[in-house]
Image: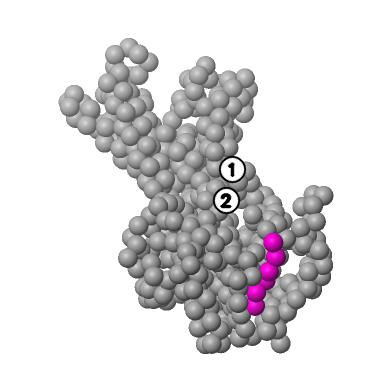
């Protein structure tokens, strides 16, 4: 039985016919060259075979099944579709750690494949500084992590020097001799001669590892911490001076300082957007969906991981703002005017609000796919649109997502608004449970719509 069977595969992009009635078989234990000039549809064919692009007609199966229907696909198929499917801020080793976790590969394989592709000496370097040839080698290392029986390689020799091309040929011949099947596309003839719960939990761990190994996450967290500290100090310094902030000896005065942590709300949402849109910006979505073809599960994992990271943003913002407030209270010899129970509720509100806004951000980022547009959209909504809507229609203010999240953290209704809507009277804040339910509902809706659209859209 052929390992790969392609029958009548056809794909159009608008008026352009990219692939027309493509049919072929690949037998086990062979190295098969998939030849064609640039633009002939080789990459599109491979993407249809791997479930990245939906064909207009025809079928493509691996071991008798469509790629998304394979059990543990990375243990059956290793694929290299493009040399840019890496986050430039991660090291080669961290990239392989993520892929090993996603594919349930033995972590000891990381050193083995680094040695095999001759990248051991640069494993600690960030991928952004790699040459194209080094990226190609890292792509091969990624494909080989789970020791699959089938390799699908798209232009693997691109960027390699003559010595590297010879190394690649020897490697592929050696794999075939061991029983592996290899499908290699090239435009140069000479180059070719489990259960749902456990899967989702593993994907959540993968997404958390991605966040921990990305500098942008730490940059956003540091920015949120810095803004919180600055505005908390400003509010504490103004307290009791007749500038609209009560004395720190009062609950309202201390409350104004503590709620300076709401900057974490905005930046947690931005972080959520980057969790999903960053995959498309850095072209790492290909590897993500090769590891987990069930795209709805991937988005669920991203939303949960984003919410966990968002909770860290909220806790950090609250702790910093509280520390500033209590420091000023102690320095002025006042007693703490807010009880422990209220402070605990504020802490919970910060954590819940940032977590749910981050999950909403994940859904928005997946829908938009453009990281820049998503980030701009977050700031436009929180700073401009909500302020305008809240100022014009005070009755709907409690139901606006950023406003609802800020009231969870103890901010008076309107206290988190920007511009003329700031402090505007009118409306009653939602109870804690109702605000939480509203934000959770919005997160579910955004992520459900994003999951639906992600399933039917091509990954390019």
Residue 300, compared with residue 348, is above or below; it is below
| Residue 359 visible (yes or no) | no
Question: Magenta segment range?
Answer: 32-37
Colour mapping: one colour
- In front of the other: 198 or 82: 82
Q: Is the N terminus in the top left, top right, bottom left or bottom right quadrant?
A: bottom right
- Which residue in the structure is indicated by mark 1? 370
Q: Residues within 10 Å of mark 1 (few under 14, many from 20)?
A: some
Query: What residue lies at 46% left-to-right and 25% top-to-bottom?
Result: 415
Q: Where does residue 131 sit, x and y in percent of width and height?
A: 44, 56
- Which residue in the structure is indicated by mark 2? 280
Q: Where does residue 14 sit, x and y in percent of width and height?
A: 79, 49
The image quarter in which residue 364 lies: top right
The outermost residue toward the top is: 242
Do the CB atoms of the residues marked 2 and 1 lie less than 8 Å apart?
yes
- In front of the other: 53 or 354: 53
């Amino acid at each position: 039985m052929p390992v790969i069977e392609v029958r009548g595969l056809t794909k159009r992009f608008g008026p352009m016919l990219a692939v027309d009635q493509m049919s072929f078989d690949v037998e086990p234990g062979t190295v098969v060259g998939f030849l064609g000039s640039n633009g002939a549809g080789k990459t599109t064919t491979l993407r249809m075979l791997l479930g990245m692009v939906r064909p207009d007609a025809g079928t493509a199966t691996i071991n008798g099944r469509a790629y998304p229907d394979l059990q543990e696909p990375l243990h059956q198929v290793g694929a290299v579709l493009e040399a840019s499917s890496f986050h430039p801020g991660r090291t080669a080793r961290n990239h392989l750690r993520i892929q090993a976790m996603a594919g349930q590969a033995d972590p000891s394989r990381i050193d083995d494949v680094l040695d095999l592709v001759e990248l051991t000496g640069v494993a600690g370097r960030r991928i952004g500084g790699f040459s194209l040839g080094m990226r190609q080698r890292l792509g091969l290392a990624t494909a080989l992590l789970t020791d699959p029986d089938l390799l699908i390689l798209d232009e693997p020799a691109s960027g390699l020097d003559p010595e590297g091309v010879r190394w690649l040929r020897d490697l592929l011949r050696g794999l075939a001799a061991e029983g592996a099947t290899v499908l290699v596309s090239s435009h140069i003839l000479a180059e070719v001669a489990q259960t749902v719960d456990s899967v989702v939990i593993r994907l959540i761990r993968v997404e958390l590892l991605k966040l921990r190994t990305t500098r942008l996450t730490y940059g956003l967290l540091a920015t949120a911490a810095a803004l919180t500290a600055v505005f908390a100090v400003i509010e504490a310094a103004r307290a009791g001076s007749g500038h609209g902030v009560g004395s720190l000896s009062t609950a309202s005065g201390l409350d104004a300082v503590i709620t300076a942590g709401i900057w974490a709300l905005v930046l947690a949402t931005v972080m959520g957007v980057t969790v999903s849109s960053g995959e498309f910006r850095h072209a790492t979505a290909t590897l993500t969906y090769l590891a987990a073809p069930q795209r709805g599960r991937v988005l669920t994992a991203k939303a949960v991981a984003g919410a966990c990271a968002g909770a860290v943003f909220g806790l950090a913002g609250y702790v910093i703002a509280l520390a500033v407030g209590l420091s000023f209270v102690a320095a002025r010899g006042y007693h703490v005017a807010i009880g422990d129970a209220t402070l605990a509720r504020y802490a919970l509100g910060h954590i819940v609000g940032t977590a749910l806004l981050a999950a909403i951000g994940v859904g928005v980022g997946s829908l938009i796919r453009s990281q820049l547009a998503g980030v701009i959209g977050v700031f436009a909504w929180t700073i401009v649109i909500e302020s305008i809507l809240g100022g014009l229609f005070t009755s709907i203010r409690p139901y606006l997502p950023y406003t609802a999240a800020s009231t969870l953290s103890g901010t008076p209704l309107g206290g988190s608004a920007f511009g003329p809507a700031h402090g505007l009277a009118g409306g009653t804040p939602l109870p804690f449970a109702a605000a939480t339910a509203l934000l959770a509902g919005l997160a579910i809706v955004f992520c459900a719509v994003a999951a639906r659209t992600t399933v039917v859209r091509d990954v390019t």
